[in-house]
Image: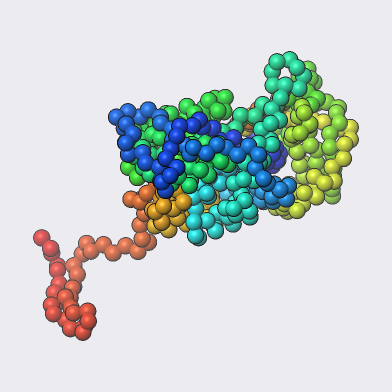
Amino acid sequence: MRIKYLIGIVIVIILLGLSLVLSGCGSDSDSSTSSTETSDLDTTSNETILIQSDKERNTSPDVSEEDISTLVEGNTAFTLDLYHFLANEKQDENRFFSPYSISLCFAMVYGAARNNTEAQMEEVFHYTLGQDYLHSAFNALDLDLTSREQDYDGDGEKDFKLNIANSMWGQKNYKFLTEYLDLLAENYGAGIQLLDLQHEPDSSCEVINDWVSEKTEGLIDSIIRSNDLNEYSLFVLVNAIYFKAKWMNEFQEESTADDLFYAPQGEVTIPMMHQWCYVNYGEGENYQAAEIPYKGNTTGMLVLLPREGKFEEFESSLTTERLAQIIENLESQEVVLKLPKFDCEPDEIDLKDVLSQMGMTDPFVFTVGDFSGMDGIPRWIYIHFARHKAFVSVDEQGTEAAAATVVGGGGGGYPSPPEIEFIVNRPFIFFIRDRVTGAILFMGRILDPS
């Protein structure tokens, strides 16, 4: 079943409230030097080794409410920027992604970015807080939101479940700056798990994919492929997020019945859930809006329903300001609610291609991208690949969703070839000359070099 653009907007708004918990357990690293030495580690097998700063996570960051609001506003702006870009690229497909997963994963990369690479990431992701405040704000928001997982009805099963994790996988024998390890530890509670990415791509991918599958309850079981890695690979950053919540008022399965859905290509018959309930509701000249709460009433599914024939007009006009106005105008009202029962697993998003077109070009180009905050070497590390996968299921009990973002990079070796080609594969004339005076010392031609 194809549920068009509406569903993309709906779930995007859900996941704006989700933050990411970086997983990692500690083993000591030498914080007295400028980089963490891994050359003495055993590389005879691809067993995972963890290195981490000796600093603990800051569980009480001094962050103002204004900084949190600024962070959320920036994430919302990125969400709509990415949504509109994808809408133009794939106009006839369902859409679902986790902008927060993408933003958080790249925030860790951003922590190592410098110069114009840093500036481009700030502009595309709306990291308006900058390096000084962004990471602590993410930390504070994460600690706040992840505290809401709870068993609300006391039946021994959590009605609101949130499993979110970030990890960094680094190349054995490579020196990562202690300052970067400190950033990961203090703000994200994570270390760098070492693998032989360069020489054992198959087993490295298996380890990383198993980790993602575990964190997403098996909904995302493959996010990285062995051909993503090569002899220049140095790191892979991964975010995984799993969300499962019951409705505040669950739909009765016996009330679900087949009904018509008016898709752009024509009428389709789908299972439609049905109930009378209280929701935060609002409407305007060309839309209706309802926010359906999950148990705990701290999270909800915001559904934006353009009037008949107004979808494209409404979609193109959806800005951060208009979204804020729509939410502000919602009021609790009793409504007759019909909502499709659906699963959506869209194609993965090639973030390298998408973000480049959105203006973030430098991070993906060898000798141009600058992530020297990771290893201290200017313009050596750049991003080789980046992608995102997501899944969502909506039924009578609630919503289950998962997403994963992966960013991999390393040193040089595969720069983009110049656009101009000069291939001497036919007869040619040549000169040998003194470049200082211009004097021609020799001249010749080659008709057949054999």
Quadrant occupied by the N terminus? top right
Rendered position, 155 above or below 103: above
Q: Residue at x 42, y 48 (%)?
A: 34
Which of the image's four quarters has the C terminus? bottom left
Q: Pick out the residue farthest to the top.
A: 155
**Between residues 260 and 213, which one lies in front from this camera angle?**
213
Q: Whole-percent x and y of residue 364?
A: 45, 52
Badge count? 0
What percent of the width, then of the height, locates residue 431? 17, 75
| As drawn, 380 above or below 403 | below
In front: 289, or 301? 301
| 3 sits to left or right of 206 | right
Residue 173, quarter of picture = top left
- Please name the residue shown 38% across and 44% down the image: 175
Residue drawn at x 63%, y 55% is 128
**Pick the front one: 399 or 306:** 399
Above or below, comparing residue 90 to residue 51 in the picture: below
In this rendering, does residue 258 appear at all?
no
Chosen colour scheme: rainbow
Rendered location of residue 66, percent (x, y): 73, 50
Residue 146 occupies quadrant = top right
Q: Foreground: 449 or 137?
A: 137
On screen, residue 194 above or below 129:
above
- Is residue 65 found left or right of 439 in the rendered image? right
Most distant residue in the front direction = 32
Q: Residue at x 59, y 57 (%)?
A: 123
Q: Is residue 149 visible?
A: yes
Residue 439 in percent (x, y) is at 17, 83
